[in-house]
Image (cartoon, rainbow, N blue to C red):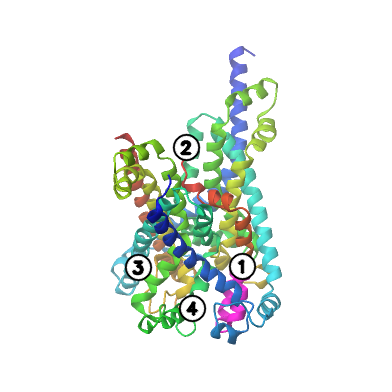
């Protein structure tokens, strides 16, 4: 063997070692995650009952979803509701998170306690949170209405989950209650990274805390805000458990809390009244559209965060 | 920074108010699960006047919670073990192998952080049927392992890249194989990162409701989350039992959280921190 061949074979052997290290992870990830995700694209071009839709129909499922009044109404209702659900998280959850983080970034007694408490609900199951709040919001015996009545505010003792215009915002706020710890902790980490000297210098120059927040902290937090925004987007465009627990698989009352994920579940998995048989092709079409929405959001974010980083 | 008096007051009022909003529901959950129904309606906030374990007894006997706990434990433990093992092996190769293939695979794995696996559920249902795993808790394990790969490769690759390279070189010169370097040097050093990945996945898997809902019907295969949803439906009007069921699901995680708060917070936000 020449020396060149020897080096080649050693290199080759090294390559094979790396491939073996990667193989189990790649196989699991391909077979049980990436594969099914991409196969959903293909499945969305088929129709047929049960688990093996075999009739190729091209874009018919999508056409139905966008133009057939029966589907269109359901789809756009779920889409709009999902946008509202996301918007409430974006505005309320992340604003509260920023406020809490800003308060937690200074030194005072009990700071760790507050941080631990704010984050605690994030460790609960979403389902448990949802069920717990349906009991607390129960119009007859729930603690929320009891508290309102005790304060003499009987007009606020409403059937929170029973009204079409209330259910979705109330459920969104329940979810905010659970997840606000996430942006809080991320913003806190970002704030801790801002140099103390910079803030001290601004204070010595007589800047108010309000101005320091908006003129110094906020601009420096922009990358963190980007990460928080994209995570809020991905998590909430796909939310299911909290709706299932508080409004059922149909997003009741009368579909006012129906999200893309509950529509996907009813269409592709559970099967919807009156047929009762899952329509996998249509379910896959809904999943594919959700996928496309998420992808465009993520690419949009990547583009902007890159652009900002290079500026 | 030190706060002046009004700032301190504002901080305490805001954080104190939110803490009440967080703790109050958890308090009502636990305290009312020990009260008879009538007393819950009469006094939903106070300590129980007559202490009862009926709710728990009923949930345990009727709902077979012992079984749900064991099932969930088995699924979580096996899935976590596999995630840590094959995830750390892959991460080692991704960090040390400089080639277009490994760069591509890294991005391929990381992309999964942003794309929820649930969107592939319909094909997973078909796949699980083909593998003849439907209605068993074994069906959950491969799905959870796949779901754990993005976070595992993301966190662990970043961690290995931070380790000083001379350490690996020295071992290699001494004749150690990649496997020996991985198992004897890298794995023990990686413990803090492995803990982060483990906690992240543990919370996700323990609390997952979607895949049990889709894959499992049979009582003997149910997980805690699935059991909770079915029992809660039955007990909707019997608050003592309903709250006992919810407490059974929530309390183990809450206790772990109280012991390991710092690690939990680090673990759950791992996906967001740039590696």
First in sequence, mark 1 or 2: give its number: 2
- In which chain is the residue bearing label 2? B
Q: Nearer the viewer, mark 1 or mark 4?
A: 4
Q: Taking A121 as reference, is A213 left or right?
A: left
Q: Nearer the viewer, mark 1 or mark 2?
A: 1
Residue B229: say if magenta: yes
First in sequence, mark 4 or 3: give its number: 3
How many angstroms separate mark 1 from mark 2 (CA)? 40 Å
Q: Nearer the viewer, mark 3 or mark 2?
A: 3
Asked whether the residues under the numbered discs 1 and 4 touch, taking CB atoms below 8 Å apart as contact, a structural biologist would say: no
Asked whether the residues under the numbered discs 4 and 3 touch, taking CB atoms below 8 Å apart as contact, a structural biologist would say: no
Q: Nearer the viewer, residue A262 or A218?
A: A218
Quick one: label 3, few (<14), some, or many (20+) residues within 10 Å?
A: many
Give the structural element (helix, strand or loop) at label 4: helix
Identify the residue under disc 1. Answer: B249
Q: Nearer the viewer, residue B87 or A224?
A: A224
How many angstroms separate mark 1 from mark 4 (CA)? 21 Å
Q: Quadrant of residue A55?
A: bottom left
Identify the residue under disc 4. Answer: A143
- In which chain is the residue bearing label 3? A
Residue segment shown in magenta: B223-249
Identify the residue under disc 3. Answer: A81
């Amino acid at each position: 063997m020449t020396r060149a061949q020897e080096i080649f074979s050693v290199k080759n052997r090294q390559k094979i070692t790396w491939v073996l290290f990667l193989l189990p992870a790649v196989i699991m990830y391909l077979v049980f995650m990436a594969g099914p995700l991409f196969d959903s694209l293909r499945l969305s071009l088929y129709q047929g009952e049960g688990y093996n839709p075999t009739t190729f129909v091209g874009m018919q499922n999508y056409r139905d979803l966008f133009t057939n009044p029966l589907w269109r109404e359901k789809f756009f209702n779920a889409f709009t509701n999902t946008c509202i659900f996301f918007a409430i998280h974006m505005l309320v959850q992340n604003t509260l998170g920023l406020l809490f983080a800003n308060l937690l970034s200074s030194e005072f007694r009990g700071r760790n306690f507050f941080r631990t408490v704010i984050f605690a609900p994030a460790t609960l199951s979403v389902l448990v949170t949802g069920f717990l709040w349906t009991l607390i919001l129960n119009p007859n015996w729930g603690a929320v209405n009891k508290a309102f009545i005790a304060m003499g505010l009987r007009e606020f003792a409403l059937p929170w989950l029973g009204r079409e215009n209330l259910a979705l915002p109330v459920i969104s706020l329940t979810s905010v209650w659970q997840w606000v710890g996430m942006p809080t902790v991320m913003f806190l980490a970002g704030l801790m990274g801002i140099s103390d000297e910079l803030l001290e210098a601004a204070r010595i120059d007589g800047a108010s805390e309000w101005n320091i927040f908006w003129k110094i902290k906020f601009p420096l937090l922009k990358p963190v805000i980007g990460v928080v925004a994209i995570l809020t987007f991905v998590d909430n465009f796909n939310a299911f458990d909290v709706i299932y627990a508080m409004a059922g698989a149909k997003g009741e009352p009368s579909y006012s809390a129906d999200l893309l994920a509950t529509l996907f579940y009813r269409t592709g998995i559970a099967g919807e009244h009156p047929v009762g048989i899952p329509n996998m092709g249509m379910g896959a079409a809904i999943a594919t559209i959700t996928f496309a929405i998420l992808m465009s959001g993520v690419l949009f974010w990547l583009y902007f965060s890159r652009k900002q980083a290079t500026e | 920074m030190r706060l002046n008096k009004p700032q301190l007051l504002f901080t305490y009022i805001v954080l104190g108010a939110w803490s009440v909003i967080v703790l109050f529901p958890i308090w009502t959950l636990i305290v009312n699960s020990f009260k008879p129904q009538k007393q819950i309606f009469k006094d939903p906030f106070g300590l129980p006047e007559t202490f009862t374990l009926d709710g728990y007894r009923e949930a345990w006997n009727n709902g077979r919670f012992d079984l749900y706990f064991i099932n969930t434990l088995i699924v979580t433990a096996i899935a976590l073990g596999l995630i840590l093992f094959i995830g750390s092996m892959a991460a080692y190769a991704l960090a040390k192998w400089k080639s277009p293939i490994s760069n591509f695979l890294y991005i391929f794995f990381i992309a999964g952080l942003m794309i929820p696996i649930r969107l592939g559920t319909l094909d997973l249902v078909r796949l699980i049927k083909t593998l003849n795993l439907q209605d068993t808790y074994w069906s959950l394990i491969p799905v959870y392992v796949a779901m754990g790969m993005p976070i595992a490769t993301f966190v662990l690759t970043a961690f290995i890249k931070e380790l000083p390279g001379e350490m690996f070189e020295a071992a290699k010169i001494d004749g150690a194989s990649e496997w020996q370097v991985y198992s004897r040097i890298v794995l023990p050093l990686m413990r803090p990162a492995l803990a982060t990945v483990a906690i992240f996945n543990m919370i996700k898997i323990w609390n997952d409701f979607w895949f049990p809902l889709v894959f499992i019907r049979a009582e003997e295969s149910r997980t805690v989350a699935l059991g909770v949803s079915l029992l809660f439906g039955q007990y909707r009007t019997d608050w003592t039992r309903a709250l006992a069921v919810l407490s059974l699901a929530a309390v183990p995680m809450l206790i772990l959280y109280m012991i390991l708060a710092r690690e939990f917070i680090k673990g759950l936000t791992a996906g967001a921190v740039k590696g």
